[in-house]
Image: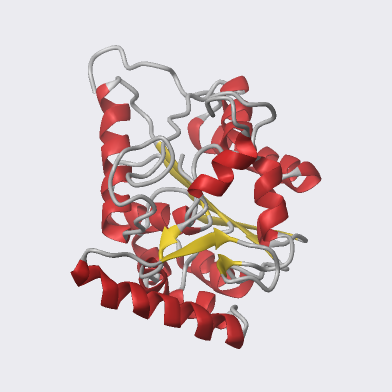
Amino acid sequence: MAHGFGATKHYGLASFAEKFAAAGYACLVFDYRHFGDSDGAPRGLLDVKRQQEDWRAAIAHARALGYRRVVLWGTSFAGGHVLDLAAERGDLDAVIAQVPHVSGLATLLALPVWSALRLSAVAAADVLLRPFGRRQYVKAFGPEGSLAAMSSPGAYRSMIRTLPKGVEATRGDGWKAYFDRHNAITASGLLQVLTYSPGRRAEKIRAPALIQAARNDRTTPFQPAKRVAGVIPNGTFIAYDADHFDVYLDEAFERVVADQLHFLDQCLGGKNPPKSSGGV
């Protein structure tokens, strides 16, 4: 399991992992290099190729631990990663893509024109500064109308709400301070988002795949996700009356994760045995 664009595992992934663990499924949750608890400099570097390498390393690690059956779970931008990886691999038992990024063009068109122009200027500045050893950053999440990669109504507030309660693992300064420190990406990463369309290879996915899309999604649009689900040979599509960030919280979260567990029970026959008995 890994999070989406510019996010870390602390933004609500524990809630999903706890549900899966309670149902008998082991979860490996990780941060990409350059983000969260993982190392890598510069911080906040968004690179599609490196993030996919991190997914491959996580799969290899799970296999090395002796787990025979592996399911990829990705949300938002990571929903695109798991679909793209499933298109190239034949060793996955299932894929769950929650409100997935499937089309760079669709994501671009979902942005207000003024926001797209401002973000393009910041991304260009990062490209120009990089040869001189400097970087231009932009906030990943921001209040509505602010200069941020995601500033749709409710985005900033929802991500704050997904943070754990208390001050654990933050050296005593609180999770809001953690969010403020990590809420930034290298601006040129925005260009990679716009050129990354993992849905183009969806017909090559052979593993059972669950695509969950929000009808009111203003970040990763609904219709492209629905079309992609339709070309996956063993695809399941479920729609929700929700926006992109609703799926991490409250009733929408409960509905989404219940459907995920039902899907896993159908694909894996109930529970994922923790270890293989005779090697990988």
Q: Where is residue 44 in the image (x, y as percent from the top left)?
A: 39, 53
Residue at left offset 43%, top offset 59%: 185
Placement of the C terminus among the 4 image quadrants: top left
- For the residue pair 88 and 254, the one nearer the viewer reads as 254
Q: Is residue 103 visible?
A: yes
- For the residue pair 114 and 95, the one nearer the viewer reads as 114
Can you say whether 73 is above or below 220 in the image? above
Looking at the image, residue 193 sits to the left or right of residue 141; the answer is left
Q: Can residue 248 be seen in this view?
A: no
Residue at left offset 45%, top offset 33%: 29
Instruction: Name, please, the residue furthest toward the right.
Output: 251
- For the residue pair 228 and 49, the one nearer the viewer reads as 49
Can you say whether 68 is above or below 264 in the image? above
Can you say whether 65 is above or below 112 in the image? above
Q: Position of residue 257 (x, y in %)?
A: 66, 40
Looking at the image, residue 153 sits to the left or right of residue 39; the answer is right
Q: Position of residue 188 (x, y in %)?
A: 36, 70
Q: Where is residue 126 in the image (x, y as percent from the top left)?
A: 34, 72
Residue at left offset 52%, top offset 61%: 139
Residue at left offset 53%, top offset 57%: 76
Looking at the image, residue 20 sits to the left or right of residue 47; the answer is right
